[in-house]
Each structure stands twice: as C-alpha cells, then as structure tokens.
Image: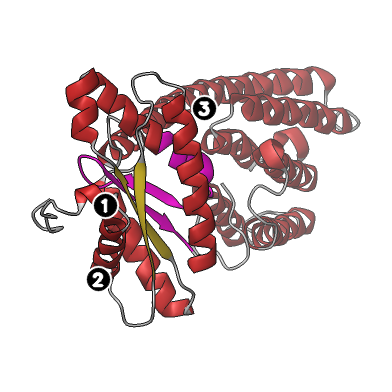
Amino acid sequence: MQGGIGHSRVRPTELATIASAIFLLATAGSPSSAEERIGLLATFGLLIGYVVVWYHVIPIGAFGRAHATIGGGIVQLIALFMLFMTGGATSPWFVFYLLPVLATVFSYRPTTTIVIATLAALGLVVVASFDARSADPATLAELLIVRLVGLGAISAMAFTITRSMRAHRQEMEQGEAQLRAALAVTEKAAMTDPLTGVHNLRALEQALAMATKRSERDQRPYSLLLVDVDRLKDVNDRSGHAAGDEALRAVANAATDVVRGYDTVARSGGDEFVIVLHDAGPDVARTITSRIQGRARERFNGDPQLTGTTITIGMATWRHGISAEALLAEADAAMYEAKPRRNHSMTRPTLAER
C-alpha cells in the first residue's frame, strides 16, 4: 500500500490521512478552549509527520505482512491523543477516531481491521476512565456504550467490506495466475518442436538474432553446430517411422544432455538440428561436438532398431561482419563435407529448398 522514497503516486489511505489533517487544521480555530486548539494543531502535525515518514521514507513492505496493521495502529494512537486533548469520550471530533478503522478496507486484510478496531475500543475505554474523574459516572457509562456501539458498527462494516475486497482480490490474482500459466504453456508450445521437445525453427531464429546481436556488441563469438541424422530414410524404410522418430528424439536428448543450460538446441528440419553455443569459440564447439557424437552413439546402440545409425555435425564460429544466415550456411556446408563419402554423389538441397 505504501510508497518508498521517490514515489509520487498518492495512495488512498495517504490521501484520506492528509484530508483529515487539513480538516482538523481548518477547525482548529473553532474550539472554545486553548487546550482543544493546541490538541488539534498537535494532531495535525503528527498526521503530517506520519504521512511523510510512513509513505515517503519507510520502504514499501518494510514490516512485511504487518505493514498495514502497524501503520493503522500508529494513526489510531494519534487519534487517541486527539481525544485526550479535545474532550475525551465527549469530544466533538470523535468521528475522526473512527477513520483509521474505516481506512483498513484499503489493506485487503480482515485481520488488520480486527486489530485496529480492538485497539480503538481499548483506547476509548482508557479515555473514558480518565473522564470518570470529572464527569457523572452514569452519564459517562451511557455515552461510552453509545460510542462503543458506534465503533462496533463501523468496525463490522469495515470488516465485511475488507473481507469482500480481499476475496475479490484473491479471485483476480488466481485468475491472473491461471492466465499467466496458460500464456506460458501456449508460448512454450509455440516455441517447441512437438516430436523431440527441443526448440523449433521459430525459437531458433530468435536465438540466432540475439546471439548475433550480443556478439556484435561484446565482440565475443558464438558457434553453431548443424546436426544431421545420416540416412534417416533408411531407418524409416527398415524399421518404420516410429523408429525414425525415436532416432530424432535420441539426437535431441543427446544434445540436450551435453550442452550448457544457456545454449539452444532446436530442430530446424526433418532430420536436422541446429545448436547455438553462446559465448563459445572453435575449441569449445569441437569439444561439445565430440561429446554429442559419443552420447548419440550410446543412445543408438542401446536400441536394436537404431544400432548402426550415425550423425554428422558441421561447425561454424561467428566472426565480425558475418550474418546468422551466412554462418548457418557455413555450418551446413561443413556438415555436408563431413558426411560419409557415399552420400556425396547425391545432390545436396540448399537451405532455402529445405
């Protein structure tokens, strides 16, 4: 509810406190006694001091969940001081004593209303005990009951409103949380390849754009690995498309197991993957290439339908002035050159054709 240093937005409770202080200042000339006048002026000063310190010096949430309760308690004590100085339980400004209880509706915490209302009732009883020295006990007791009934009615109303507002706020927060979760699921689905669970082409394009921009800014290279499953069509023809899908998942899992948490593994085509190795030069790229090949071999050998399946990896490292598209084409060419010799007689499709 409260603002920290430098916050200019006025909170509802802050505005209500300032308005009450100004009204007390405006009526300071009307009391018949100097003591009441001094009491109102002192109350005005205390309220303004509270506003400055509580809303513009003390950081937001300084007291955790008790922040609103402590603030309301301080204002209630200031109002209790006003009662002492302006006639006690008979004070014509008693209505201001009820305002801190009403203001608790802005805290969205019913417990805050209960605490402040209890504090107000105890304060009223204390004030009445001092008034008993100079007032008729029967009259004072009747007045105290009337004041307490009024305070109880205001407190009950504030508690009901606060609880209703809290329930409504919780429903809104739950709805927002569900919406954020749904959006997160949708966003993840839009950026994920459904077969392998790694990123898709859309996510790859974003990763390449960010990696290139970062490298151009910091002059630190990144590397690309283009991974191709060799003769995937033969696997499909020999063991069925389910086996071919399993081969793709095996490659995706092997790459994910090896790369660092901030690298990107994406499926860019039917049998190809692109891995973006952030902040990585040729040495790091070669090391990770070797590890991916070894991990993929382990996974292929663990499945009788995939035994003998291999992958080929092409590598390229960013240099100043080279675009992501050119770097990807370079990795593609390196991957093609590294293919088994018997595949070189085949015509290699271009990236655009694929």
The residue to which callout 3 is attached is 162
Disc 1 target residue: 341
Mark 3 neighbour class, 10 Å CA radius: few under 14, some 14 to 19, many 20 or more: many
Q: What amino acid is found at the position of numbered circle 1 in the picture? A: Arg
Q: Three-letter amino acid code at disc 2? A: Ala
Task: Of the two numbered discs 3 and 1 on the same chain, state the one appearing first in sequence.
Answer: 3
As measured in the structure, the alpha-carbon distance from the residue carrying label 3 to the one carrying label 2 is 62 Å
Give coordinates of residue 137: x percent, y percent: 84, 20
Element marked by disc 2: helix
Mark 3, mark 2: which one is toward the viewer?
2
Residue drawn where x is 41% and y is 20% of the image = 303
Expressed as whole percent of the image width and height from the top left, the position of residue 265 reads 39, 47
Real-space CA distance between mark 3 and mark 1, rounded to the nearest whole angstrom = 77 Å
Q: Quadrant of residue 122?
A: top right
Mark 3, secondary structure of its residue? helix
Query: Badge 2 is on which residue?
Result: 326
Instruction: Name the amino acid type tagged 3.
Output: Thr
> Residue lying farthest front?
342
Q: Earlier in the sequence, mark 2 or mark 1?
A: 2
Q: Which residues are magenta?
A: 252-278
Q: In the displayed structure, does residue 253 sit left or right of residue 335?
A: right
